[in-house]
Image (tube, grey):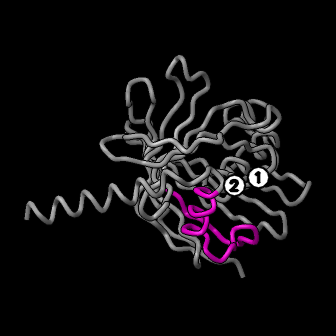
Amino acid sequence: MAKYFIVLVFFLGMQISKAQNLTAPELLDKAIAYHDPDKLWSVFQGKLFITMNYPDGRERQSEVEIDLPKQHFEITSTTEATIIKQTLDKEECTLKLNGSTTISEEDMKTHRLSCERANFMKNYYLYLYGLPMKLKDPGTHLDSKVQTKTFKGKEYLVLKVTYDKSVGKDIWYFYFNPSSYALEVYQFFHDESKNDGEYILLSDLENVGTIKIPKVRAWYYNKDDKHLGTDTLTKTLALD
């Protein structure tokens, strides 16, 4: 058993050493080849059913429809008795609260409803569920050095990513399995010197066609490891 363990550690060490010689673009390409081997994300057409569970027991159900070729995005979120639907069809924006487009200013404010917010939600879901493929988007800057970090007791190959100011101001780190190149953790900071921001642990995979999307995402604060919530991809459907 001891001999087997030594051989295994040696083998893993060789894999990590070999992976460390990758450039940042090479590591990203390998990660994309793992998650989207047939390069289908750019023409994604499907529905994602997501359940968000909060530490205080609250739950939110979301149905997210993404049709990239038709430039269509729609999210329907249900929390207790409130149903919010936000639709972006090319340049057209439609907001509904409990099935009605007639929404009072008070309700708009209470539920944070606006077309600007709808666009934020679209960018949020396309970004997080489109990773690591979205790291090829314009305005994205990969640090030239591939880092090796141990996070929560596991060793990863890490890419540091910054963005044009028009895209985003946060600093992101993406943690890849050194053997499979699967994306297993990502982390962002508003100001890294303050250890603010959050990290997200990814687990399980959902095959959407040949695209591998993390099924479970658990969110934590960087500063104190406080758990913020966990969202789970419960079902996916292809659009007709």
Quarter where residue 92 is shown: bottom right
User: Which residue is farthest right?
Assistant: 91
How busy is the neighbourhood of tag 2: few (under 14 within 10 Å), some, or many (20 plus)?
some
In this view, which residue lies farthest toward the top?
194
Q: Which residue is mark 1?
A: 137
Q: Is residue 26 above or below residue 34?
A: above
Q: Which residue is mark 2?
A: 134
46 part of magenta stretch: yes
On-image quarter of the N terminus: bottom left
Check if mark 2's residue and mark 1's residue have beta carbons within 8 Å: yes
Query: Is residue 98 visible to the viewer in this orientation of the structure?
Result: no
* 14 lies left or right of 96: left
Count of marks placed on residues? 2
The picture places residue 231, in percent across and down from the top left corner, at: 47, 51
Q: Position of residue 77 (x, y in %)?
A: 61, 52
Q: Secondary structure at mark 2?
A: helix
Badge 1, how many Cα within 10 Å: few under 14, some, many 20+?
Answer: few
Residues rendered magenta in the picture: 26-51
Expressed as whole percent of the image width and height from the top left, the position of residue 152 reads: 33, 40
